[in-house]
Amino acid sequence: MRATPETVLRRVRGLIGTAGNERSNVAVTRLVLRVLLFDGGPVPAWRADAACAAEPAELFDPEPSDTASIAEAKRVCAGCQVRAVCLADVLGWEPVTRRHGIAGGLTAGERDRLVAARRRTARQEVAA
Ligand code: SF4
């Protein structure tokens, strides 16, 4: 069974959040996240080309008021060769009510607006 994002977050918080390992051992944290996010299955091939793989994971999960980190994460995404597939991937599984962080070069709010715009366009095309 594939883990839901809520399950993943709960597991991550339980495993590394309270232990405080996320800052002291980034490699272990990434390994734990990979196992949890992909249920131990193979990581999608495009992830090997992700520009964020060489960046601190917390950079892509900034507080909404942390404009400097948001801008830095978006700068990394802008130069990422798998940005389009990353965005399509996250839009495919991310619950509308639980969007957070930077993915595919967009903030959670920007992804919300993109999805809403796509839905409006789809409805207009059906109505036309
Ligand atoms: S677009 Fe951004 S979040 Fe997605 S893989 Fe590339 S760097 Fe990472």
Image (spheres, rainbow, N blue to C red):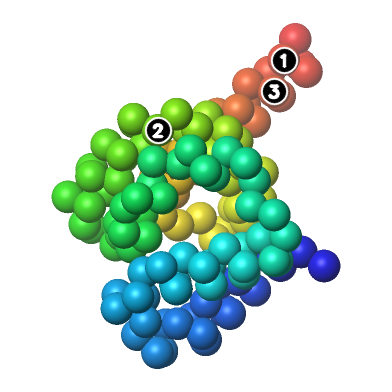
Is 93 situated above or below 32?
Answer: above
Residue 13 in percent (x, y) is at 49, 81
Residue at the location (82% across, 67% down)? 1
Q: Which residue is mark 2?
A: 80
At label 1, counting other C-alpha atoms closer than 10 Å, the crowd grade (few under 14, some 14-19, many 20 or more) is few
Residue 8 falls in image quadrant: bottom right
Q: CA distance from mark 1 to mark 3?
A: 5 Å
Q: Residue at x 39, y 41 (%)?
A: 51
Q: Is residue 84 above or below residue 27?
A: above
Judged from this view, the residue extending furthest toward the left is 68
Q: What residue type is disc 3 on? A: Ala
Which of 127 and 110 lies nearest the eye of the viewer? 110
> What secondary structure is found at the residue carrying circle 1?
helix
Task: Name the residue tied to disc 3.
Answer: 122
Q: Is residue 113 above or below residue 10?
A: above
Give the amino acid at mark 1. Glu
Percent position (x, y) of residue 101? 41, 55
Lower position in the chain sequence, tag 2 or tag 1:
2
Q: Residues within 10 Å of mark 2 (few under 14, many from 20)?
A: some
Asked if disc 2 is less than 8 Å from ligand 1, the answer is yes
| Point 17% across, 50% down: residue | 68
The residue that label 1 is drawn on is 125
* Secondary element at image label 2: loop
